[in-house]
């Protein structure tokens, strides 16, 4: 018997491949997916690579106020100008001029050499040059502070050596007294102090996790928003798991390929040392993709509201970089920050990437990170499934923004 006019025909069960083909058609027809699949991660990756194309911070602008005008003060200025991270752009007549430059953001640091600086240094009295630097920006501030300390130690050793030689001490004895106790330090990882090793390594996955999470919420949430949940389920023979697997498979494959490209970019193109197995690192990256898809299912299943799910997912993913322990150690965080860090698959993936990829640790040492990502993959869909099944099968919940 024919249905009523305007009535939508009952959806016919098809199967897993039908769901995959249907999703591919939806992706190609939807500009949102094209943006989140191709444009956003590509532009994000390219931007990060352009920003961090230099291995070290060099040539940060600084100013000098030389109130002494002596040979010794000029030596300090030459040493400061030779420091890797600094570039003397201005010599001012008064400290207030340097303060004005700092407040306008034209310099990161300035040095004030007081009067009688050389007079005090030659007589063995404390000769103090005062340096001011902007520590609000942690990375430039730390590098400037390190170079200022090196310049101070070098100039102090030169002055003290000359004074002792003038007093008749042998050159060899003076050299020994310049550094009576030395520490032979060896950097085990990143000996070049290349900040790309920790910033780029964390920022690229941070961009990727936002795209994965929002794309997953969008692709499932649109079935609820557009009222097509019955067609979605019927296309997979009314099996929730089959429907979700077919719908998410194209995203899984694409983001996995993008993640593998990211790993290749880090260790092949940027030349970062890969001390672990490349295949193991790639496998961990695929787990990372699956973990964030699982979290996306939890958001849309638990909340049901498409707009609210996207908003809270953005709050969850956008600041994730700050809680991963890359710029601030997790062990030094307060309890809530540690808890929040553990709720992020990004944290566990970066731990895995550093341990397995950079440090070359045995796989057994990275198993806690692998287990955590697997936990997200298993736990989040299991919790979301009952709520998502109810929403997909209840027309009253469809159409919610």
Image: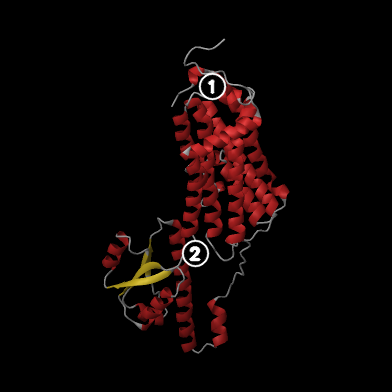
Badge 1: how crowded within 10 Å, few (<14), some, or many (20+)? many
The answer to whether 18 is drawn above or below residue 254 in the figure is above
**x and y percent of residue 232 in the render?**
57, 26
Nearer the camera: disc 1 or disc 2: 1
Is residue 295 something that shows in the picture? no
Between 162 and 111, the one nearer to me in the picture: 111
**x and y percent of residue 315 in the render?**
46, 38
Q: Residue furthest top?
A: 1
Left or right: residue 38 versus residue 276 is: left
- The residue depicted at 57 percent of the width and 34 percent of the height is 23
Q: Earlier in the sequence, mark 1 or mark 2?
A: 2
- The residue depicted at 37 percent of the width and 67 percent of the height is 61
In the picture of the structure, the residue carrying the numbered disc 2 is: 54
Left or right: residue 378 versus residue 88 is: right
Q: Secondary structure at mark 1?
A: helix
Q: Secondary structure at mark 2?
A: loop
Between 117 and 225, the one nearer to me in the picture: 225
Q: Residue 90: give its label.
A: none
The answer to whether 124 is drawn above or below residue 231 in the figure is below
Q: Quadrant of the N terminus?
A: top right
In the picture of the structure, the residue carrying the numbered disc 1 is: 391
- The residue depicted at 49 percent of the width and 82 percent of the height is 161
């Amino acid at each position: 018997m024919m249905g009523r006019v305007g009535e939508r025909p009952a959806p016919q069960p098809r199967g897993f491949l039908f769901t995959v083909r249907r999703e591919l058609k939806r992706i190609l027809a939807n500009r949102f997916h094209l943006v989140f699949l191709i444009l956003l991660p590509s532009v994000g990756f390219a931007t990060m690579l352009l920003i961090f194309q230099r291995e070290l911070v060099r040539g940060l602008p600084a100013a000098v106020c030389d109130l002494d005008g002596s040979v010794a003060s000029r030596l300090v200025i030459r040493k400061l100008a030779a420091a890797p991270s600094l570039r003397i752009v201005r010599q001012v007549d008064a400290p207030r001029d340097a303060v004005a430059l700092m407040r306008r953001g034209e310099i990161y640091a300035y040095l004030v050499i007081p009067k009688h600086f050389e007079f005090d240094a030659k007589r063995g009295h404390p000769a103090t040059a005062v340096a001011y630097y902007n520590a609000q920006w942690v990375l430039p501030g730390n590098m400037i502070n390190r170079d200022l300390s090196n310049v101070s130690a070098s100039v102090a050793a030169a002055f003290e050596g000359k004074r002792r030689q003038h007093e008749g001490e042998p050159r060899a004895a003076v050299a020994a007294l310049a550094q009576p106790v030395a520490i032979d330090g060896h950097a085990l990882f990143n000996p070049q102090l290349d900040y790309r090793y920790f910033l780029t390594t964390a920022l690229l996955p941070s961009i990727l996790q936002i795209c994965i999470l929002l794309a997953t919420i969008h692709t499932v949430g649109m079935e609820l928003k557009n009222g097509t949940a019955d067609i979605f389920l019927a296309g997979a023979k009314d099996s929730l798991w089959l429907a979700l697997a077919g719908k998410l498979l194209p995203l899984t494959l694409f983001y996995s390929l993008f993640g593998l490209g990211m790993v290749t970019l880090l260790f092949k193109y940027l030349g970062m040392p890969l001390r672990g197995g490349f295949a193991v690192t790639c496998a961990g990256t695929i787990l990372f993709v699956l973990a964030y898809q699982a979290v996306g299912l939890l958001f849309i299943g638990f909340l049901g509201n498409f707009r609210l799910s996207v908003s809270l997912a953005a709050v969850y993913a956008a600041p994730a970089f700050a809680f991963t322990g890359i710029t601030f150690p997790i062990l030094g965080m307060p309890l809530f920050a540690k808890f929040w860090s553990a709720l992020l698959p990004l944290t566990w993936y970066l731990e895995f990437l550093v341990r397995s990829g950079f440090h070359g640790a045995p796989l057994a040492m990275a198993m806690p990170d692998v287990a955590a990502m697997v936990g997200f993959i298993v736990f989040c869909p299991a919790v979301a499934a009952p709520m998502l099944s109810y929403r997909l099968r209840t027309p009253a919940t469809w159409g919610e923004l």
